[in-house]
Amino acid sequence: MPDEFNFDDIDKMLAPIDKDANKAEMLEKLNAAFASGMTPFIDFTQAYVFLVFPTPDGKEWNEISFMREDGNLTKSKQDPETAVHDIKEEIVRGLSEFVEINVTEVTGVATTHAKDPKAFIAEMIKVLPASAPVLRSQAEIQKVIDMVKSA
């Protein structure tokens, strides 16, 4: 009879989450998010901080999500069209848990700016409800930095 499967063996193969290192990396990315001169997309909840901002040449977009409780950090790079799609999904699926979102309006704006994340972000910042936990300007960055630091 084969050995029984042991989930602890799988856990040993996974690297533990270095919450402090991930916090430091997220803080670094937040501090640099406005460096390109473009407004990034940043939303924040008690559970996580989600950030999408362009690479220096603007051809790709960085997507970073920091889970406040366990310190997990996920990151990827997307082409502009995928970045618009991912931001739209975050608004429709993530933010809709916290504020009422007009999905038809968000989808329409995403369709209009399907390959232009900069224009999509600018318009979404204007049309999302004032209560939406979205950063609207660089002047507000400190509250998100404080949320990451306190995680």
Image (cartoon, grey):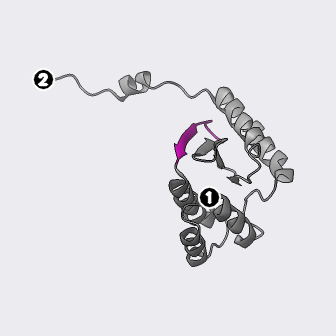
Residue at the limit of the structure toward the left, as seen here: 1
Q: Are dots 1 and 2 in contact, CB under 8 Å?
A: no
Q: Residues within 10 Å of mark 2 (few under 14, many from 20)?
A: few
Residue 141 at x, y = what percent? 81, 48
Residue at point 45% right, 26% down? 14
Question: Which quadrant of the figure has residue 104?
Answer: bottom right
Q: Badge 2 is on which residue?
A: 1
SS at badge 1 = helix
Q: Residue at x 49, y 24 (%)?
A: 15
Q: Is residue 49 visible?
A: no
Span colored in magenta: 68-78
Image spot of residue 1 (x, y percent): 12, 23
Residue 117, numbered circle = 1
Q: Nearer the viewer, mark 1 or mark 2?
A: 1
Is residue 74 rendered magenta in the image? yes
Residue 76 vertical position relative to residue 133 in the rendered view, above or below: above
Residue 27 drawn at (x, y percent): 74, 36
The tag earlier along the polypeptide, 1 or 2, is 2
Residue 23 visible, this orientation:
yes
